[in-house]
Structures are given as C-alpha cells and as structure tokens.
Image (cartoon, rainbow, N blue to C red):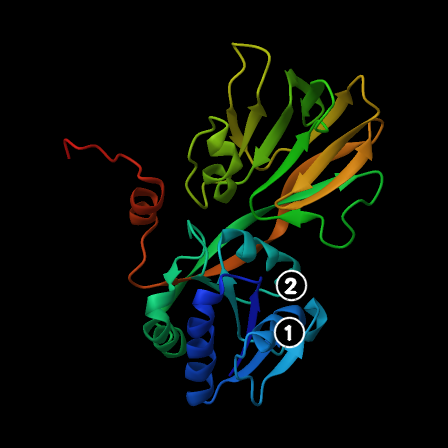
C-alpha cells in the first residue's frame, strides 16, 4: 500500500495532527510519500519524517499510488486535481482549514478515517470536471478543473461584455464584471456566492452565473454539460482574466475560449458515515431555521 500526501502550509497549531497522520500510516506499514514543498514545511516545523520519501509531479504517482491524502481546506484539495489528473487515484480530504465542504474528514478523526480507508469502508464519489479550450494554450497540460471556469475583468477595468454561444447558437450577452461556468461541485462555491443554485453531484449539468450583472433580468441558468459553450469578449480594456478553480491567467481580448465537460472524472473518497445532504446542512447551514 502506497499513499501520497499533499498539503499547503497551515496553522502550526495543527502540526501535531500531521505527525499523528504520518505515525498512524507508518504503524500500519503503509509506504508514505509527501509532496516536496509540503515535506519542507513539515520538516521545518519539527515533524518526524523518518523513512518518508518525496514526490513533485503527477508522473511520480501514476500506476504506483493507491490514494492521495489532501491536508488542508477545500482550496488545497482543488490543487490535487493537477497531481492526479486522469490517473483515477482516489483523494481523501482531511480538513485542516475552515469550511471543509470537499475536505470532509475532521482532523480529530484521523485514526478512525485511516482505519476505514485501509479496510475499504468507503465509497468513491465521482465528480465531473470542466475543461477550457482556447486557441492559445494558457493552462498547459492541466486546462481543466473541479469547480469552475471564470471569466473576469481586471481589477481596475470597467465591466466587460461577454457574448455566450451554446453549440454555436447565440445564448446571451452578459454586461457584467464576469461570468462563472461551474460544475455541480462548483455550484456550492463561487457560483453560490453570486446567487447561483445548488446542483447535486452527478446531475450532468453546468451552471452559468453572471458576476455583478448590469441587467436586473439576467439570472443564472442551468444546462446540460453535454453542451459546448463558447465566448466572445468586448471590453474597453485590452485584457481580462481567465480562472480555472484557483489558477488565474491574464489574456488578450481577441482570445477564443470554449468550455465543455472533461472526458474523465475525479474520485473523492467518502467514508461510509458521510452524506452529501448532511454536509449541505452542516457546512452551508442549508435550511437552518430556529423553528426547526
């Protein structure tokens, strides 16, 4: 059994939990490898890393790694998309952050979670990915994400006009600060904060949500993820921003952009005591009412 660990620097008050995780895995005779940058962070904070090796790229995980553990919040788990890519390596998120909507395992339950993982007491929650295509390669080999693709004006720029087309047919023109195209997973992230609906996993949809639209009658729209959505951008500024999850690039107005569903999925580990509806209620306080 070989398990990879990825994380970002976190509050040093949680260092003891990282040590607990590593000790638990080694005690169960698991081969542990830690992402190189995260290894340096742990070592600098006195975590004992005896018999622990490192990795730095996707290629070092393919066909050799059984699971990847993400230590941090949801943003940290989004980073792992660039590591597992299309390898189907299951990802278990252990919440060292705040919300923990995707990273659902509480750090207080590390021993129990690892025991369940190694005994196979879990299900795989497959999540659709969204792919960005453009006439200029702006995201290299990882032009896809778990949450969303966002088109956004630069900070000091005036609003932009985004002409959207559905399979070549004109859909709408959005006068706005930007536009989000989210997966069902991303529907509870940036899209939700901009007034978008919650879409359940595996529903086979995209959500198009405008950001600060300058039209009172423009609302989010839900459509099948079998569609290809293309965009043309108008702006008095010469450039705008394109984001996949937390990765952002600045591009020129004349770039050609399209989004579609990626042809492979991401596997999230869900321990048998986890439930999506319960996560909605607990993490987002969905339906919370003093009368209940």
Write the residue at 47% across / 28% down.
196
Residue 161 x %, y %:
71, 17
Q: Which residue is mark 2?
A: 83
Write the residue at 31% across / 39% down.
285
Specify whether 195 is left or right of 230: left
Secondary structure under the numbered disc 2 in the rendered image: helix
Q: Which residue is mark 1?
A: 40
Q: Quadrant of residue 292?
A: top left
Residue 271 x %, y %:
35, 64
For the question of whether residue 247 can be seen, the reply is: yes
Write the residue at 60% across / 31% down.
180
Mark 1 closeness class: few <14, some 14–19, many ≥20 residues within 10 Å: some
For the question of whether residue 172 can be seen, the reply is: no
Up-down relation of residue 161 to residue 251 (above or below): above
Residue 209 x %, y %:
55, 27
Q: Quadrant of residue 214?
A: top right
């Amino acid at each position: 059994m070989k398990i990879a660990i990825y994380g970002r620097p976190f509050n040093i008050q949680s260092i003891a939990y990282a040590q607990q995780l590593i000790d638990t895995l080694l005690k169960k005779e698991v081969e542990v490898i830690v992402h190189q940058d995260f290894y340096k962070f742990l070592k600098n904070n006195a975590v004992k890393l005896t018999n622990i090796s490192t990795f730095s790229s996707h290629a070092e995980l393919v066909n050799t790694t059984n699971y990847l553990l993400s230590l941090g919040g949801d943003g940290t788990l989004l980073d792992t998309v660039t590591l597992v890519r299309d390898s189907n390596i299951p990802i278990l998120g252990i919440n060292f952050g705040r919300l923990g909507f995707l990273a659902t395992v509480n750090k207080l339950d590390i021993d129990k979670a690892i025991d369940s993982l190694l005994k196979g007491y879990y299900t795989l929650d497959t999540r659709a990915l969204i792919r960005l295509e453009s006439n200029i390669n702006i995201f290299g080999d990882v032009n896809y994400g778990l949450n969303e693709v966002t088109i956004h004006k630069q900070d000091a720029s005036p609003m932009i006009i985004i002409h959207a087309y559905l399979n070549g047919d004109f859909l709408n023109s959005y006068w706005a600060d930007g536009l989000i195209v989210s997966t069902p997973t991303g529907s509870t992230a940036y899209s939700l904060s901009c007034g978008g609906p919650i879409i359940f996993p595996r529903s086979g949809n995209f959500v198009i949500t405008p950001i600060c639209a300058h039209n009172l009658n423009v609302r989010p729209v839900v459509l099948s993820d079998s569609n290809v959505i293309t965009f043309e951008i108008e702006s008095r500024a010469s450039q705008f921003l394109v984001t996949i999850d937390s990765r952002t690039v600045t591009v020129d107005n004349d770039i050609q952009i399209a989004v579609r569903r990626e042809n492979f999925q991401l596997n999230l580990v869900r321990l048998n005591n986890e439930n999506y509806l319960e996560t909605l209620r607990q993490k987002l306080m969905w339906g919370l009412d003093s009368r209940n």
